[in-house]
């Protein structure tokens, strides 16, 4: 903070006029990004709060809903996101070491992984639609969905409604997560272009670093969504 | 001093370097953005104020005879939404905060000037959407959007209003983010944390609430929009949801939001009182830390809005107890402001009158908060006019008094002109009298049992309602006056000079109006804040008498 | 004049006195604190106002003072908390053996049912000195059952039961308000609690309600058929208000005027489009075949009973001042 | 002076570390999916959350460089965000968990 300004850095094209030096500018950006992630955490936190309370209130319904989700696809998506996080981290490392081509390749890979995730997610949603698992008038639970759970036919309507709460949260949470992924891919489109143009150097790569932080954050949200949505009472399936 | 002041108009400053709409709409200068905000929030203040007057006029008689019931419901809903989200929350932070934060800490601008402009545009987009909603039918859910009424029963424009407030939330978040980063990273050499002006401390605390609270209301309203638009079942009991969950999530933000409104006003008062007492603020550390304490404790008390809503007995006990914790730092502030005047040299200039008004009204508002936090009493007065009176004492008596006090205090810096002091004092007196006449009767009404949001009411409540309506017209005059003489002073006001109050802050050491980058050279701070013992008395103020 | 200007709500339940005592304590405490602060500010501001030749003193602050004025308020707050909590605890724990009354809130009326089977709308008759437990739910949005004279209030949520209890201490008629905003006619969702001497109450109960079973059954039927959706008390609805209409001349849409006698009411129920009231559209559904004769009689009796104000059965008769009883539809 | 403070030049982590983290995360994903099929009663949820938290911590510390940052403020931000999230979850859950008691 109290670094003395270095005369040379006033000519740095990346230094904005109102900062004293590049270090101050970088620290400001980094803090800004972390604060933004803190707000993102609270944003998803509202939904996690809803999830927690409904899962506590309707444990059986959530189990039924969870078991209808496609576990292999969910697990595959988790792996895809982890891979994309790795490529982001490696891309930043490559930039730190001034390996521009490697960085561009890794960033492209990141976007490919990101898009793969979205495509798989799309297939999952399509499957939900075909199975009438979208909340609303056409919502229906088949006998297969209800396997291993006995519900008094009298209570079936209430049961279906509460199960819809699971799907409502599922779509809200995965939908907003996917939206973050789309924004992330857009962000990386720009970052890849800027890297390719050689705008980031081992001395200045703050935007890339911040983009990486965002991407990892979105990854972490999925790391929680996966067990919370896909892995409830799986053992009752057999 | 007087001779230099004559030349201020010709000196280069942030107002005269560039002209034209483009230079304003694409500016990244925090001072110009502050003025953009000032104009926009003033607009919304008068829109919301108009709705308030309509509400008061309807309540002049017990029968619902001025407007239809549905219209009345829209009036109080949009009064609340506009005043809370489009006036009070951005009021002091986005105008005075934007203008002063960089200057007070000796920086050239906020850390992210373009993001600052973006947050104004987000505010304008949200505001336009809100006005579109108002003009094409409005919304009638109450500003609280309680489900399932908002998601399944209301047939008004809930989605539009919800999205407007959702977008506005991002504006708040970005403003808060900018402030926190600026205060951490951009302080001038020597500006240590213990030398920060108290306005900065309170703005910092406010920004923390912006960052941690606003995302929760954003997602909550988004879920309401989803539930209404896509028939998801999250809060509607007919679709498996729980309306109390909505209330939890809503108040997790909306209670701290009260502190978003009051903390900056407290910061303003903490600047005004030492200046017009010519004394260091009493107990600087305690006043600074109480701002942080209010921000943190503010997050622990939200369910005291739910005591009769059906939450468990035990959590009601917890939240009632926690609610009293917030009262302690608030009390500390009031005591310290009072003690600051002890053995000082007090003048009754307009900003000081507003500060007195703030302390008085905030004390009453805070004390009636103790009533509401007491479980047994809350059961009776919850959702009655007692609550209305209480939070208007905090939000209008507190936040708006603080805003007006701050506007009068910093107007010479913002515009370079002096407003007519006599008119200023008159307006402050009118606001104070009008306010008390409007809202004090509502405490009695509330304890009598008059519920809020009532379009018509039993005749025995009429006398108090008439008093309240009478007060509201006086209050309206009091609010119009400053707008008139501020505008007047822009052209005809006497040049203010750099430091008309002889105040100690860094913002007073630059010219009035300041240059685009605030300081010709980055200042180096060597003194404590409020070092009034070593400051000469200002000439202007002593000439005034 | 002062009949219209009371400053204190009636105390009519065992709970009310406790609440008022804490309230008075808090009012006195607030007055004391306000006086202390305001007088101190006034004294400081005048005694230390700016004078020539007197400089302010340098004072940093005082930790001892700060701690004192933090701890003392905290102690006082603790007392208020415990006091308030005790009252709340009492309010939230209904005594054993309380008489149960079922309450259903809907847009925009209260439906109440006694254990004995008597049903009431927007009105609850109860004996003085008995514990009454309300078991409440809502059909649509959140409402709130609020009786200021008893100092009780409880939100009524759809999809679950909420409870409240009270013991009335004073015979009389008290306001019942809905205090949670619930839509257009939120302020019309009011009624009254009639507290009676036990003997009087027994008489009322055996008579099947104060106005004879016919009218009150009709009232229930009126609600059950959804009539109040349109026929609201303040002529805000899609249909004309029925309060006080019986026996009065009615201007029709085609310009004729008829007297609203039993036959007109009956005809309006069975074939509504025959004689439509001026200013309204013929949108009322036909009830022929939906109600039998007995029910029809009950409905007619109910509409007639709306003339005997202030029964309050149709809603907000309490509120309307004489000038607003007009039957003109509002613009 | 400033270049020494900077994370830029002095924290280029070995790529083997990143691959190791990646391997750990993949293994933990497989483990959590596998464990879910075993009946542990209520422990299933606990195990799933512990594994998820473990994965999240690894990502934050290594991929997001929090372990290596010289900046205390980053850690403060991370902790306070988690703290306030837990307040939201804990205090609202406190209501639901005690409703049946009264």
Image (cartoon, rainbow, N blue to C red):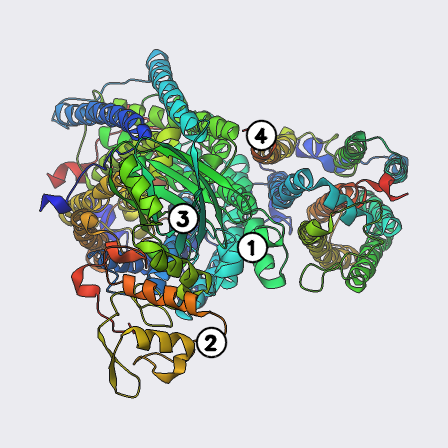
Q: Image point 62% across, 60% down: which residue?
A: B231
Query: Are the numbered discs 3 and 4 placed on the same chain, yes or no?
Result: no
From the top left corner, tell me how far across and down residue B33 is, in percent: 43, 55
Please name the residue that numbered disc 1 is placed on. B224
Helix, strand or loop status at disc 1: helix
In the image, residue C194 above or below residue D73 = below
Please name the residue that numbered disc 2 is placed on. C288
The quadrant of the picture occupied by the C terminus of chain B is top left
Number of the label disc, if any, that sits on residue D98: 4
Count residues near mark 4 (Cα–Cα under 10 Å), then give few for <14, some for 14-19, many for 20+.
some
Closest to the camera, between mark 3 and mark 1, is: 3
Helix, strand or loop status at disc 2: loop
Q: Which chain letter matches label 2?
A: C
Distance in Å between CA atoms under marks 3 and 4: 35 Å
Q: Which chain letter matches label 1?
A: B
In the image, D64 versus C78, the foreground residue is C78
Q: Quadrant of residue A93?
A: top right
């Amino acid at each position: 903070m109290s670094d003395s300004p270095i005369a040379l850095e006033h000519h740095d094209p990346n230094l904005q006029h109102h900062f004293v030096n590049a270090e101050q500018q970088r620290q400001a950006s980094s803090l800004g990004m972390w604060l933004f992630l803190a707000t993102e955490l609270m944003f998803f936190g509202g939904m996690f709060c809803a999830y927690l309370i409904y899962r506590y209130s309707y444990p059986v319904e959530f189990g039924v809903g969870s078991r209808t989700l496609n576990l292999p696809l969910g697990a595959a998506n988790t792996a895809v996101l982890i891979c994309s996080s790795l490529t982001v981290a490696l891309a930043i490392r490559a930039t730190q070491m001034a390996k521009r081509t490697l960085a561009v390749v890794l960033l492209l890979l990141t976007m490919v992984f990101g898009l793969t995730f979205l495509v798989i997610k799309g297939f999952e949603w399509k499957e939900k639609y075909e199975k009438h698992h979208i909340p609303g008038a056409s919502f229906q639970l088949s006998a297969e969905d209800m396997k291993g759970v006995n519900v008094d036919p009298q209570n079936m309507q209430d049961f279906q409604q509460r199960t819809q709460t699971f799907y409502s949260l599922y779509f809200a949470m995965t939908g907003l997560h996917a939206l973050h992924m789309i924004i992330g891919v857009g962000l990386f489109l720009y970052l890849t272009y800027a890297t390719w143009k050689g705008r980031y150097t081992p001395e200045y790569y703050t935007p890339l670093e911040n983009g990486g932080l965002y991407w990892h954050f979105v990854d972490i949200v999925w790391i929680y969504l996966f067990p919370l949505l896909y892995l409830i009472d799986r053992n009752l399936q057999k | 001093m007087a001779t230099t002041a004559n030349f201020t108009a010709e000196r280069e400053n942030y107002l005269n370097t560039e002209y034209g709409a483009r230079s304003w709409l694409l500016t990244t200068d925090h001072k110009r953005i502050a003025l953009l905000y000032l104009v926009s929030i003033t607009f919304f203040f008068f829109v919301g104020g108009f709705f308030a007057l309509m509400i008061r006029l309807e309540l002049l008689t017990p029968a619902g005879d001025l407007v239809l019931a549905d219209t009345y419901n829209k009036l109080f809903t949009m009064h609340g939404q506009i005043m809370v989200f489009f006036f009070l929350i951005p009021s002091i932070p986005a105008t005075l905060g934007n203008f002063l934060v960089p200057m007070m800490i000796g920086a050239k601008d906020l850390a992210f000037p373009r993001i600052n402009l973006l947050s104004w545009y987000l505010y304008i987009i949200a505001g336009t959407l809100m006005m579109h909603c108002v003009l094409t039918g409005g919304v009638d859910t109450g500003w609280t959007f309680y489900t399932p009424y908002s998601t399944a029963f209301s047939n008004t424009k809930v989605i539009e209003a919800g999205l407007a407030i959702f977008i506005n939330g991002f504006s708040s978040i970005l403003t808060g983010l900018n402030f926190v980063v600026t205060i951490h990273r951009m302080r001038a050499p020597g500006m240590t944390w213990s030398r920060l002006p108290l306005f900065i401390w309170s703005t910092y605390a406010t920004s923390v609430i912006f960052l941690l609270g606003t995302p929760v209301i954003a997602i909550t309203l988004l879920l309401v929009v989803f539930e209404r638009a896509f028939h998801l079942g999250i809060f509607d009991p007919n679709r498996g949801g729980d309306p109390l969950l909505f209330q939890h999530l809503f108040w997790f933000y909306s209670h701290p939001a009260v502190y978003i409104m009051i903390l900056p006003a407290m910061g303003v008062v903490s600047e005004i009182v030492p200046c017009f007492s010519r004394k260091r603020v009493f107990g600087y550390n305690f006043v600074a830390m109480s701002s942080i304490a209010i921000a943190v404790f503010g997050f622990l008390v939200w369910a005291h809005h739910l005591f009769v809503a059906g939450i468990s007995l035990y959590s009601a006990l917890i939240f009632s107890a926690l609610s009293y914790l917030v009262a302690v730092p608030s009390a500390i502030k009031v005591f310290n402001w009072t003690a600051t005047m002890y053995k000082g040299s007090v003048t009754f200039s307009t900003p000081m009158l507003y500060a007195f008004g703030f302390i008085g009204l905030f004390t009453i508002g805070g004390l009636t908060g103790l009533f509401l936090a007491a479980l047994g009493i809350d059961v009776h007065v919850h959702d009655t006019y007692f609550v209305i009176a209480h939070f208007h004492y905090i939000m209008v008596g507190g936040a708006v008094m603080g805003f007006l006090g701050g506007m009068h205090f910093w107007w010479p810096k913002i515009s370079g002109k002096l407003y007519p002091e006599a008119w200023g004092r008159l307006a402050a007196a009118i606001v104070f009298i009008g306010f008390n006449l409007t809202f004090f009767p509502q405490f009695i009404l509330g304890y009598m049992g008059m519920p809020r949001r009532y379009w018509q009411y039993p005749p025995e409540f009429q006398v108090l309602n008439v008093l309240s309506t009478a007060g509201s017209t006086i209050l309206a005059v009091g609010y119009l006056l400053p707008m008139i003489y501020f505008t007047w002073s822009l052209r005809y006001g006497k040049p203010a000079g750099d430091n008309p109050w002889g105040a100690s802050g860094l913002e007073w050491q630059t010219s009035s109006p300041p240059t685009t980058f605030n300081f010709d050279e980055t200042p180096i701070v060597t003194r404590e804040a409020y070092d009034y013992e070593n400051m000469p008395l200002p000439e202007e103020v002593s000439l005034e008498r | 004049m002062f009949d219209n200007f009371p400053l204190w709500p009636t105390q009519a339940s065992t709970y009310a006195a406790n609440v008022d005592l804490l309230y008075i304590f808090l009012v006195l405490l607030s007055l004391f604190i306000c006086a202390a602060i305001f007088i101190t500010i006034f004294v400081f501001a005048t005694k230390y106002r700016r004078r020539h030749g007197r400089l302010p003193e340098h004072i940093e602050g005082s930790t001892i003072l700060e701690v004192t004025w933090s701890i003392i308020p905290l102690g006082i707050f603790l007392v208020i908390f415990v006091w308030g909590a005790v009252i709340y605890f009492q309010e939230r724990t209904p005594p054993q053996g309380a008489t149960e009354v079922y309450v259903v809130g809907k847009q925009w009326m209260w439906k109440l049912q006694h254990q004995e089977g008597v049903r009431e709308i927007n009105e609850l008759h109860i004996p003085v000195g008995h514990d009454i437990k309300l078991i409440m739910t809502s059909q649509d949005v959140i409402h709130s059952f609020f009786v200021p004279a008893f100092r009780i209030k409880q939100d009524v949520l759809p999809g679950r039961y909420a409870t409240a209890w009270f013991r009335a201490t004073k015979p009389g008629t008290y306001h019942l308000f809905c205090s949670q905003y619930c839509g257009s006619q939120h302020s019309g969702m009011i009624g009254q609690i009639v507290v009676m001497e036990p003997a009087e109450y027994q008489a009322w109960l055996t008579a099947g309600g104060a106005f004879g079973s016919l009218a009150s059954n009709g009232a229930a039927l009126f609600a059950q058929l959804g009539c109040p959706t349109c026929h609201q008390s303040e002529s805000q609805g899609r249909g004309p208000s029925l309060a006080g209409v019986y026996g009065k001349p009615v201007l029709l849409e085609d310009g004729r005027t008829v007297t609203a006698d039993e036959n007109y009411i009956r005809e309006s129920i069975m074939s509504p489009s025959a004689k439509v009231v001026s200013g309204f559209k013929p949108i009322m559904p036909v009830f022929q075949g939906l109600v039998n004769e007995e029910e029809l009689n009950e409905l007619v009796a109910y509409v007639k009973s709306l003339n005997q104000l202030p029964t309050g059965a149709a809603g907000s008769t309490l509120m309307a001042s004489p000038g607003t009883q007009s039957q003109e539809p509002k613009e | 002076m400033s270049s020494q403070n900077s994370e830029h030049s002095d924290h280029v982590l070995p790529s083997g570390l990143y691959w190791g983290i990646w391997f750990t995360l993949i293994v933990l994903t497989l483990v959590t999916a596998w464990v879910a099929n075993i009946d542990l009663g209520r422990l299933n949820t606990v195990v799933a959350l512990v594994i998820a938290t473990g994965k999240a911590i690894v990502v934050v510390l290594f991929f997001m460089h929090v372990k290596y940052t010289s900046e205390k403020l980053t850690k403060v931000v991370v902790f306070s965000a988690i703290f306030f999230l837990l307040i939201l979850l804990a205090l609202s859950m406190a209501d639901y968990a005690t409703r049946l008691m009264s």
